[in-house]
Image: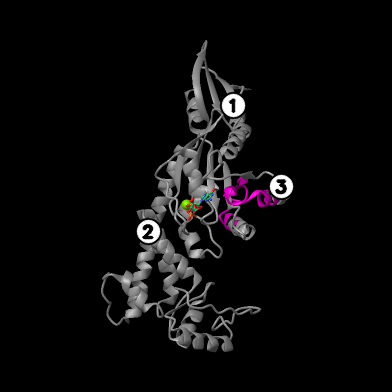
Amino acid sequence: MVVGEVVQRLERPHPATYLGTGKIDELRARIEELQASVVIFDDELTPAQGKNIEVATGRRVIDRAELILDIFATRARTSEAKLQVELAQLEYMLPRLTRMWAHLERVRGGIGMRGPGETQLETDRRMIGHRIKLLRERLEDVERTRSVQRQARQGAFRVALVGYTNAGKSSILKGMTGASDVVVEDRLFATLDPLTRDADVGGGARVLMTDTVGFIRKLPHHLVASFRATLEEVTETDLLLHVIDASHPAWEDQRAVVEDVLADLGASRTPIRHVFNKMDQLDGPNASALRDRVSNLLPDSIFASAVTDCGLDSLRRELAAAVRVMRPLSIVHLPADSGKLLADLYREAEVLNVGTEGSAVVVRARMDDAMAGRLRRAGATVSAGVDRD
Ligand SMILES: Nc1nc2c(ncn2[C@@H]2O[C@H](COP(=O)(O)OP(=O)(O)OP(=O)(O)O)[C@@H](O)[C@H]2O)c(=O)[nH]1
Ligand SMILES: [Mg+2]
């Protein structure tokens, strides 16, 4: 339970104590008065700042990064998510070991013995160093497996849902695909593992849709680093859908946070569309005010609701149109003996059907311009197919 709040405006945080000296005294007095047991800072503290504040207040100090790591740890269900969270936690802990002694007892769980002449602290540092190395290796395996899985899916049009935590990404995946195994919850970081499902968007177009972990303001950099395997899904996709909670008063700030993380991940060049979700939460005037504002700011935006009937129709229409534009339907005549080209087509295009005309193999497939160009250079003829609506 939150018993009180202390705020200070400073040009920059105090290097030793984050808060100014007078404010630390005030904090100590408030803690005594309110009988607070823990102090949580809504910002990342340096190891020295955390330690100094603990000494000054005599209370356990948790910063924003540690709090987010703890939430992630409670949400991790799969072994991959657990590995990623543990790695981030240990890396966070390493420079803070002296302070986090009590905390550490929980994770140490009896691994190894103290070497000759080592202090317990040195032993712990060494153990954690080993464990970090092991976790990194395991995650590299995970990354390789994921990349193989992605290659196997290359032919389909891929869409990744990204956005601030709780914006409704999983609800959209569920609504679009009917998948019942999608976790939707009104809490932060309900989703840690990416989940990919096939969605029929109408007009003969399908997409593979991936749900990803949500972002948050000041996401600890250890987390971004250890979730890289997971987040790589967003850099290798045909289209990013940035889901925004239209009913959240701070949606503009949340959007900026998400865009910064995407830039960090190297996803800035992936085509992106903004989906304003939870439109059902806005009354008529507010909904039109939002649409007006957004039509100037992000003209290609899609307005949706994951929970109302037909609330995702606009998204389906827009995705079907995007597939048609980015992967136009083509008719390919392959010369005889072009098994390899056919294999390429299966791998990199969405093959709809294959027939023969005389000795030629005729394929109807959705493909991007690059693939069509490659086929032409290899001696195939490629002509535009007619898309049905
Ligand atoms: N009213 C309304 N609520 C919605 C809508 N979409 C999602 N929600 C609710 O918002 C909450 C969060 O939804 P999720 O789909 O879990 O959100 P998320 O973006 O996947 O969240 P994380 O996985 O935690 O990042 C849930 O309580 C949903 O029921 C919507 O269009 N309208
Ligand atoms: Mg989710």
Residue flagged by tag 3: what amino acid is it? Answer: Ser
Q: Secondary structure at mark 3?
A: helix
Q: Secondary structure at mark 1?
A: strand
In the image, farthest residue toward the top: 358
Q: Residues within 10 Å of mark 3 (few under 14, many from 20)?
A: few
* Pointer 1 residue Cβ closer than 8 Å to ligand 1: no
Q: Is residue 282 magenta?
A: yes
Residue 10 vs residue 180, the one in the foreground: 180
Q: Earlier in the sequence, mark 1 or mark 2?
A: 2
Find disc 2 in the rendering and name its residue: 82
Name the mark on residue 122: none
Give how far across and how far down residue 24 sits, in percent: 54, 86
Name the mark on residue 329: 1
Question: Which segment did they paint magenta?
Answer: 261-290
Give how far across and how far down residue 41 sits, in percent: 51, 75
Colouring convention used in this rendered image of the protein: one colour
* Pointer 3 residue Cβ closer than 8 Å to ligand 1: no
Name the mark on residue 295: 3
* Pointer 2 residue Cβ closer than 8 Å to ligand 1: no
Q: Quadrant of the N terminus?
A: bottom left
Q: Alpha-carbon distance for marks 2 and 3?
A: 41 Å
Q: Is residue 386 above or below residue 164?
A: above
